[in-house]
Amino acid sequence: MGAAVGFRTIEGVAGMTTATTFAVKRTAKRASANVRDPERTRAVILTAATAEITAKGLGGARVDEIAERAGVNKRMIYHYFGGKEGLYLAVLEAAYAEIRSEEIKLDLGKRDPVEGMSELVLFTWNYYREHPEFLSLLATENLHRAAYLKRSKKIRELHSPLIGMIGDLLQRGAKTKVFRKDVDPVELYISIAALGFFYLSNRHTLSTIFGRDLTAPASVKARGEHLLDVVLSYLRP
């Protein structure tokens, strides 16, 4: 806007009309492409919204800037998501759906209990490391006391397969006497998640407090090994 206001020229109305015509054509072409491929448009908007909300939080994110990142008219955001709050909920659901999808690919039902549990623990740790946007979204939603997530009609069904997989590993492990009995799969997963989430979310303050670089590759590697040892030690009968 500032550049447009400060544009100095005396080429006249004809030049302005030509520029406006080209802009309208570009906008129309973009809008037409978006309408023809709604799934791609939704995906592009979600990606842009994730980046914007991760960088600025829900309060700081703006629909105009999300639309600009996505390369779409902001009306498309209202069309597909109803507004910023609906878009934010869709971002949360997509983030959870992605990690749950990757967990299912581990195919833990066919793994030895100890091997499968080790795989899940390390997967969770590495996923958190490689997807800081996921941790940021969780922190944002917890600041809102899960007010938006409570509106989701999908979130619980997304988590059912995960708890089922963990429960199956625990039952098979208890049966073969490599795991203790009566472990709650939900409590166990919360512990696995917490051991990685707390470290990564607080690595800068913890590094300062203890005078140790917790972002260094050696520290990160050691933390993953420690996390695995803690979980497996707890599960031993």
Image (cartoon, helix red, strand yellow):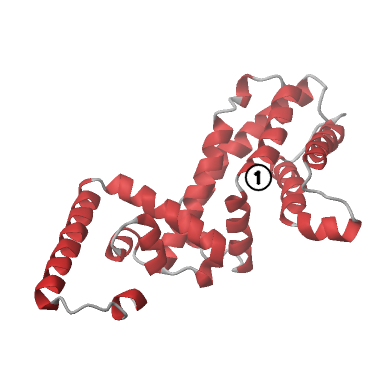
Going 21% across and 56% down the picture, which residue do you hit? 31
Frontmost residue, 16 versus 145: 16
- The C terminus is located in which quarter? top right
Q: Is residue 189 left or right of residue 162?
A: right
Residue closer to the observer: 31 or 95? 31
Q: Amino acid at mark 1?
A: Tyr
Q: Is residue 152 something one can see in this rendering?
A: no
| On screen, residue 67 above or below 191 | below
Q: Is residue 50 above or below residue 187?
A: below
Residue, disc 1? 128
For label 1, the crowd category at 10 Å Cα-Cα, with few meaning under 14, some 14 to 19 and many 20 or more, is: some
Q: Is 178 on the left-hand or right-hand side of 151?
A: right
Image point (56%, 43%), residue name: 159
Q: How many marks?
A: 1
Q: Is residue 77 visible?
A: yes
Secondary structure at numbered mark 1? helix
For the point 41% across and 66% down, the residue is: 65
* Picture coordinates of residue 112, whole percent (x, y): 71, 19
Is 7 on the left or on the right of 200, as rendered? left
Residue 104: where, in percent of width, then height? Answer: 55, 32
Q: Residue furthest front?
A: 10
Q: Position of 15 compared to 7: left or right?
A: left
Which quadrant of the figure has residue 145? Answer: bottom right
Judged from this view, the residue extending furthest toward the left is 14
User: Eyeballing the image, is 115 above or below 147?
Assistant: above
Whether residue 111 is situated above or below residue 199 in the rendered picture: above
- In this view, the residue in front, 107 or 29, is 29
Q: Nearer the viewer, residue 18 or 68?
A: 18
Instruction: Return the x and y of residue 198 as percentages of the image width and height.
Output: 75, 53
Task: Where is residue 1? Give x, y as percent.
Answer: 33, 76
In percent of the image, x 46 and y 61: which residue is there?
A: 88
